Amino acid sequence: MPLGDSITGSPGCWRALLWNQLQTAGYIDIDFVGTLPPQGCGVAHDGDNEGHGGFLAINIADQNQLVGWLAATNPNIVMMHLGTNDAWSNRGTTAIIAAFSKLVDQMRTNNPNMKILVAKIIPMNPSMCTECGQRVVNLNAALDSWAASKATSTSPITVVDQFTGFSTATDTYDGVHPTALVTRKLQASGSHRLLPLSAAGPTLDEQAQPPARVQRRQASQRTQQAQWCRHGGNVAGRDGPGVVRA
């Protein structure tokens, strides 16, 4: 399940690139899930998602919106890029992290073995919010310790660094949203974190390889694909014969 705001869903073409890269790598039985349909991109892909433009993580948690989305789709893996609109709305880091914790609890109620990827969100520098950039920095700085304390052996949380190497001046068209070209950075950071969590790949032995070997095997695809997928060891559950719902 790709979960987020407009960066994930409107149109979120990094998802199309990630989907096709997974297919090329031999992960042909991954089912992207969500209650929202694909939104273009001009590339054939599994476009189901939960990328809700303008939504705050705090509101999604407080209004229990994720509960219904999970019940409708039953994912094994959630890829979450949330917090941009919270930062824009001047919601504090503590409140956002509390919302993330509630969302994780809801994910585990739906699936106790949920594998969760949480992004250090991309930087933002909109002309109308000079403080937004630092708010994002503050949120991202809190994620590693939060994830370590919230993770369990059956439901790991992997923090994916989508902030580093991303420039609001050259990689966005408005200080917030990625340009079409730069969606490849988002795709790249996703793939190396997602691949080892998927049981639907070439072989289980390949998925159990340490991160360095996974990186070498994917070296030619490493921009932002390089981060969503480089977690070793834990393998997602399957939905039916060989299908992983992400």
Image: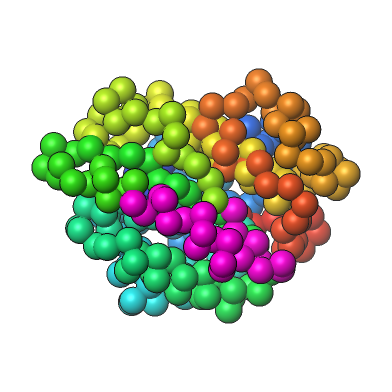
**Residue 142 among those drawn in magenta:** yes
| Res 77 → quadrant | bottom right
* Residue 58 seen in render: yes
| Of residues 155 and 23, the one drawn nearer to the viewer in this rendering | 155
> Is residue 70 placed above or below 115 in the rendered structure?
below
| Of residues 171 and 92, the one drawn nearer to the viewer in this rendering | 92
* Residue 20 seen in render: no
Q: Is residue 162 left or right of residue 24?
A: left
> Is residue 242 placed above or below 213 in the rendered structure?
below
| Residue at screen point 75% across, 61% down | 238
Q: Is residue 134 left or right of residue 46?
A: left
Q: Main secondary structure of the magenta part?
A: helix
Quick one: which residue is furthest to the left in this view? 128
Q: Is residue 31 left or right of residue 141?
A: right
| Residue at screen point 33% across, 77% down | 63
Percent from the top left, x then y, of residue 11? 37, 41
Colour scheme of the rendered structure: rainbow
Percent from the top left, x then y, of residue 115? 64, 60
| Residue at screen point 56% across, 67% down | 149
| Of residues 117 and 55, the one drawn nearer to the viewer in this rendering | 117
Q: Is residue 240 left or right of residue 115?
A: right
Q: In which quadrant of the rendered image does the C terminus lie?
A: bottom right
How many numbered marks are there? 0
| Residue at screen point 68% across, 24% down | 219
Q: In which quadrant of the rendered image does the N terminus lie?
A: bottom right
> Is residue 221 placed above or below 53 in the rendered structure?
above
| Res 165 → quadrant | top left
Percent from the top left, x then y, of residue 95? 32, 68
- Range of residues picked out in magenta: 138-158
**Residue 39 among those drawn in magenta:** no
Percent from the top left, x then y, of residue 7? 36, 44
